[in-house]
Amino acid sequence: MSGLGWLILGGVGLGVLVGILLAWRPLRRFYQEIETIRAQELFQLQREYLEAKFFDTGAQSEKPRGLRWKECEWEKSVEFVRDKRSGKLLAFVGVLITFEPTQPEAASSSWQEPRTATAVFHFNGRKWQVGRVLFNLNPHQVLDKYPNIERVEPTNQQG
């Protein structure tokens, strides 16, 4: 191939590379929007299962010590958020957790009163998974406390 051919091929390659770089952000944003819509719909479809799984996971954790998880009362609303650093999608649901003592010293504990908490769920790109519980914080307080997460606007959903 002649020098002119290489020059033309290099110019075309450079043009393609520049085009990809210019389109990357809008394409990434578009993909995140599609993923968010799909994840929010999937969460609503799986919500009852996820709540039961959360309760089972919490009950098996034996936290707080000396208390057994007795009941969870769930808020209807869901706060969908995105971790600014990782880009991961999370769902926060407010929950009121009731405990019962398993040890005599826990019987006088203030944990006998129902506790406000936030249930955290993670979307791994395919499905929702149970995360952790944040005691003594409702979802709005979690949003205020952690600056590395941002609220994601909900899609038109029921619930």
Image: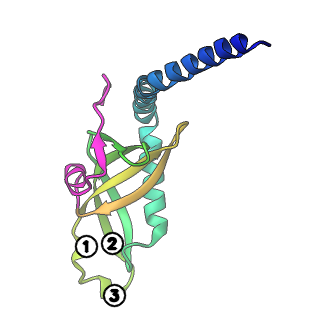
Indicate the amino acid at tag 1: Gln
Indicate the amino acid at tag 2: Glu
Q: Are marks 3 and 1 in contact (CB under 8 Å)?
A: no
Magenta-tinted stretch: 137-159
- Residue tagged by mark 1? 112
Q: Are marks 1 and 2 in contact (CB under 8 Å)?
A: yes
Q: Which is nearer the eye, 5 or 120?
A: 5
- Residue tagged by mark 3? 104
**Residue at the right extreme?**
1
Asked which secondary structure carries label 2, the reply is: strand
Residue at 38 percent of width and 80 percent of height? 66
Residue 31 locus on image (x, y percent) = 46, 26
Q: Which is nearer the eye, 85 or 1?
A: 1
Q: Which is nearer the eye, 140 or 47?
A: 140
- Residue tagged by mark 2? 100
Indicate the amino acid at tag 3: Pro
Vertical position of residue 136 compared to residue 5: above or below: below
Mark 1 vs mark 2: which is more N-terminal?
2
Residue at 22 percent of width and 54 percent of height? 138
